[in-house]
Image: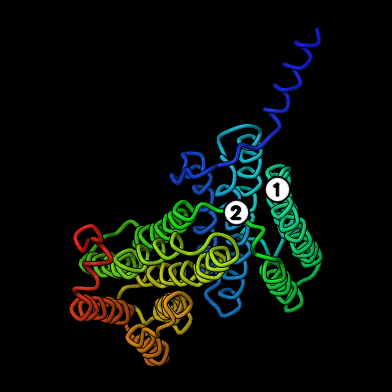
């Protein structure tokens, strides 16, 4: 009887425990499944901004994206500590997915009739995240302290969003901005040594989310084109793919392998965790936001190829690409301590040209952006030819 009781208690413990990931670097199928919900979230943010193509609509869409991004980031850290497919973690991940899906469904009215439901569902997503981290940190005092610190900033952020659901106008937007700032700022006050991560897995997870964001730009081409396909739509679609391909190239050709190798080479503990927090959790947000804005600009362009492009969509198209490039500049400055003047210069040029494209036929700024990004890639590939090959094929350099 004692043996049977012991076996039963061990079985229950195994079901309600978290299995640590160890050194396994592959992204699991459940993580990819979880990320599919984020696909809908990104699509909904684009739809929110497209339905209200004003500065206020843009701000609302980016605030929602920031809040949802920070919840996704939490699970990226979590699944770099625990195996999401073992123990009770799998079931809680499914619960978080359901709550995340509800958040995504509420996005179009997140500042309106669905504000409270969005905040409640978001609270479930974040509470599940904290509970799983507490489960994983049972035998790790450093991780437990970091998790308790994160729980405080999470509670503050969720609480302010609940307050925002009862407000409207500028006050509501201000509360959203405050909630996002305090929630994202929480980790800056926590000792980073307490966190745990598998660097290769962590970097790959963020690379995959960039691909998901780029996929939204392709979807935007399709939804913007509508049912009638003519010569103008064909040209705009080709240019749109060229822009999306350029954004992919700018990240995955050199930036992704360099950032991954540097994260792996960083000393485990505070140094690596700070790099992961700054380079991936923080700086990948403007990258994703920039891609989403470009997707919005392309959607509006495909919907009105020959019509004048208004100022806000023009900013989304060119300003989104500029934000993406500026994030790359900050990324390199943080990790390599050098300034990429070419990407910085092009970003400033794109921002400066936004007013000039106000009222110009929509196809013109899209063609200009495709040409400018292609020229940047050609130039960088030429001047960094040997260094690029060493980064992309380190086995040949050895």
Q: Is residue 358 visible?
A: no
Indicate the position of residue 213 as horizontal and vertical percent values: 44, 60
Horizontally, is 78 left or right of 321 in the view? right
Indicate the position of residue 330 as horizontal and vertical percent values: 47, 79
Mark 2 and mark 1 in contact (Cβ < 8 Å)? yes
Image quarter hosting the N terminus: top right
Q: Residue at x 55, y 49 (%)?
A: 80
Q: Cα distance, mark 1 to mark 2?
A: 10 Å
Q: Nearer the viewer, residue 311 or 243?
A: 243
Say which quarter of the image contains residue 94: top right
Q: Which of the two discs, 1 and 2, labels the residue nearer the N terminus?
A: 1
How many other residues sit within 10 Å of disc 2, few (<14), some (14-19) or many (≥20)? many
Horizontally, is 122 left or right of 362 in the view? right
Q: Nearer the viewer, residue 339 or 71?
A: 339
Q: What residue sits right under mark 2 in the picture?
A: 196
Q: Residue at x 72, y 28 (%)?
A: 13
Q: What residue sits right under mark 1 in the picture?
A: 140
Image quarter hosting the C terminus: bottom left
Q: In the structure shown, which secondary structural element does the residue marked by tag 2 occupy? A: loop
Indicate the position of residue 259 as horizontal and vertical percent values: 41, 66
Indicate the position of residue 170 as horizontal and vertical percent values: 73, 79
Horizontally, is 336 left or right of 114 in the view? left
Q: Residue at x 56, y 40 (%)?
A: 83
């Amino acid at each position: 009887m004692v043996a049977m009781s012991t076996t039963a208690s061990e079985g229950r413990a195994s079901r309600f425990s978290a299995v640590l990931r160890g050194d396994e670097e592959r992204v699991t199928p459940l993580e990819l499944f979880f990320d599919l919900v984020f696909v809908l979230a990104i699509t909904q943010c684009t739809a929110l901004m497209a339905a209200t193509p004003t500065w206020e609509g843009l701000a609302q869409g980016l605030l929602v994206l920031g809040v949802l991004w920070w919840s996704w980031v939490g699970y990226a850290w979590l699944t770099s500590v625990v195996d999401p497919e073992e123990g009770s973690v799998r079931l809680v991940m499914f619960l978080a997915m359901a709550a995340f899906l509800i958040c995504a469904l509420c996005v179009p009215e997140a500042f309106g009739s669905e504000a409270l439901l969005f905040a409640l569902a978001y609270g479930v997503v974040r509470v599940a995240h904290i509970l799983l981290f507490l489960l994983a940190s049972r035998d790790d005092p450093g991780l437990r302290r970091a998790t308790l610190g994160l729980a405080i900033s999470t509670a503050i952020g969720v609480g302010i969003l609940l307050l925002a659901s009862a407000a409207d106008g500028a006050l509501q937007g201000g509360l959203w901005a405050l909630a996002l700032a305090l929630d994202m700022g929480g980790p800056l006050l926590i000792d980073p040594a307490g966190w745990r991560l598998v660097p290769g897995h962590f970097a790959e997870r963020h690379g995959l989310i960039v691909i998901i964001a780029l996929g939204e730009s392709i979807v935007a081409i399709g939804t913007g084109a509508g049912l009638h396909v003519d010569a103008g739509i064909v040209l705009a679609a080709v240019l749109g793919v060229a822009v999306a391909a350029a954004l992919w190239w700018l990240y995955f050709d050199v930036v992704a392998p360099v950032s991954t190798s540097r994260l792996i080479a960083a000393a485990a503990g505070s140094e690596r965790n700070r790099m992961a927090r700054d380079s991936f959790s923080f700086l990948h947000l403007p990258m994703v936001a920039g891609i989403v804005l470009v997707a919005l600009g392309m959607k509006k362009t495909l919907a009105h190829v020959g019509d004048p492009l208004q100022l806000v969509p023009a900013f989304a198209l060119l300003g989104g690409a500029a934000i993406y490039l500026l994030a790359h500049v900050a990324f390199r400055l943080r990790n390599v301590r050098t300034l990429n003047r070419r990407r910085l210069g092009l970003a400033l040029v794109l921002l400066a040209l936004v007013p000039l494209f106000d009222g110009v036929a929509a196809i013109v700024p899209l063609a200009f952006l495709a040409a400018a990004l292609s020229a940047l890639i050609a130039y960088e590939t030429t001047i960094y030819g040997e260094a690029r090959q060493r980064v992309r094929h380190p086995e040949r350099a050895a």
